[in-house]
Image (spheres, rainbow, N blue to C red):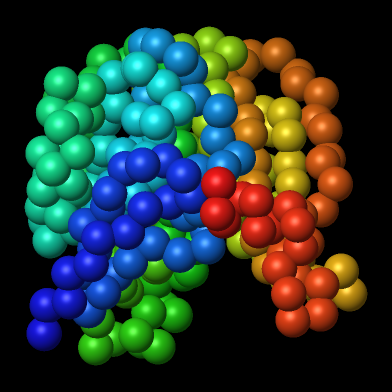
């Protein structure tokens, strides 16, 4: 059954159409939206954009041209509806295609900022949510993977331009290795943990495309809860 809702990330003012029977944005999306610092002009690309939540919301932070790239038609259609309803057709464009075909739409070395909330989990783990194909593809490396995302980022980004990602700490070694293979160097890393005494369950990464070696800054951890209450910082991020 279709369950369309209209939701807003933080105080962006951008309404996102979501079908909660398929897939809807979560804390990862909100944290990446807060963490990302898109270029004020030029071109911004949201890879693996889903229903467009991050890319559309970034229209509140930048006047740059924004492209949403999503392979699943059902999610891309939701994003198209949101583009129209938010009067963003002049700024935001939906691309419903495989990442491997991106150069049909966007030239290499022309993008100022990429944001990406990618599939975190390996393909073989998708059996856990086999009854929801859309959710399985959004969360698992079924239609794309880390290699492809980073190769596409290398192709699209201008020199010294930024890639903002949210990812899982258990795959951090692999992520950093593959970034290095694609001339993408981390500049800022922030670990996210539910409570101060729990292991990190998310990481936020700000990286740049460069042929040089970049120094990396490890930011203070973002702790979401103190007891049963959101921390002041977490509350500010979620509420805007």
Residue displayed at 74% across by 81% down: 228
Q: Which residue ends up furthest to the right in the rendered image? A: 197
Q: Give percent across and percent down for residue 32.
A: 54, 46
Q: Give the vertical position of 28 relative to 157 (above or below).
A: below
Quadrant in the picture for the N terminus:
bottom left
Residue displayed at 81% across by 53% down: 221
Query: In this view of the protein, which residue sits in the foreground, 78 or 96?
Result: 78
Q: Give percent across and percent down for residue 90.
A: 15, 21
Q: Give the vertical position of 134 relative to 79 (above or below).
A: below
Q: Can residue 182 be seen in this view?
A: no
Residue displayed at 15% across by 32% down: 87
Tell me how many marks there are.
0
Q: Give the vertical position of 229 relative to 208 (above or below).
A: below
Q: Give percent across and percent down for residue 187.
A: 72, 29
Q: Give percent across and percent down for residue 76.
A: 16, 51
- Please state if 172 lies on the left or on the right of 35 as rendered: right
Residue displayed at 63% across by 34% down: 206
- Please state if 18 lies on the left or on the right of 8 as rendered: left
- Please state if 74 lies on the left or on the right of 50 as rendered: left
- Please state if 224 lies on the left or on the right of 133 as rendered: right
């Amino acid at each position: 059954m279709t369950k369309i809702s209209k939701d807003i990330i933080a105080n962006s003012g951008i309404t996102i159409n979501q079908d909660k029977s398929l897939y809807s944005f979560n804390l990862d999306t909100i944290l990446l939206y807060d963490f990302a610092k898109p270029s004020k002009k030029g071109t911004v690309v949201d890879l693996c954009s889903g229903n467009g939540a991050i890319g559309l919301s970034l229209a509140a932070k930048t006047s740059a041209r924004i492209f949403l790239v999503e392979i699943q038609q059902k999610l891309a259609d939701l994003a198209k509806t949101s583009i129209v309803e938010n009067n963003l057709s002049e700024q935001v464009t939906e691309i419903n295609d495989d990442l491997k075909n991106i150069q049909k739409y966007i030239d290499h070395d022309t993008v100022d900022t990429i944001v990406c909330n990618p599939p975190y989990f390996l393909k073989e783990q998708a059996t856990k949510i086999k009854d929801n194909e859309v959710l399985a593809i959004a969360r698992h490396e079924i239609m794309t993977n880390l290699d492809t995302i980073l190769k596409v980022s290398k192709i699209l980004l201008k020199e010294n331009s930024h890639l903002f990602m949210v990812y899982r700490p258990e795959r951090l070694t692999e992520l950093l290795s593959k970034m290095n293979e694609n001339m993408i160097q981390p500049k800022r890393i922030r670990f996210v943990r539910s409570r101060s005494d729990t292991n990190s369950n998310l990481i936020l990464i700000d990286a740049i495309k460069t042929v040089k070696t970049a120094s990396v800054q490890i930011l203070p951890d973002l702790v979401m809860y103190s007891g049963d209450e959101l921390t002041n910082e977490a509350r500010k991020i979620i509420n805007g």
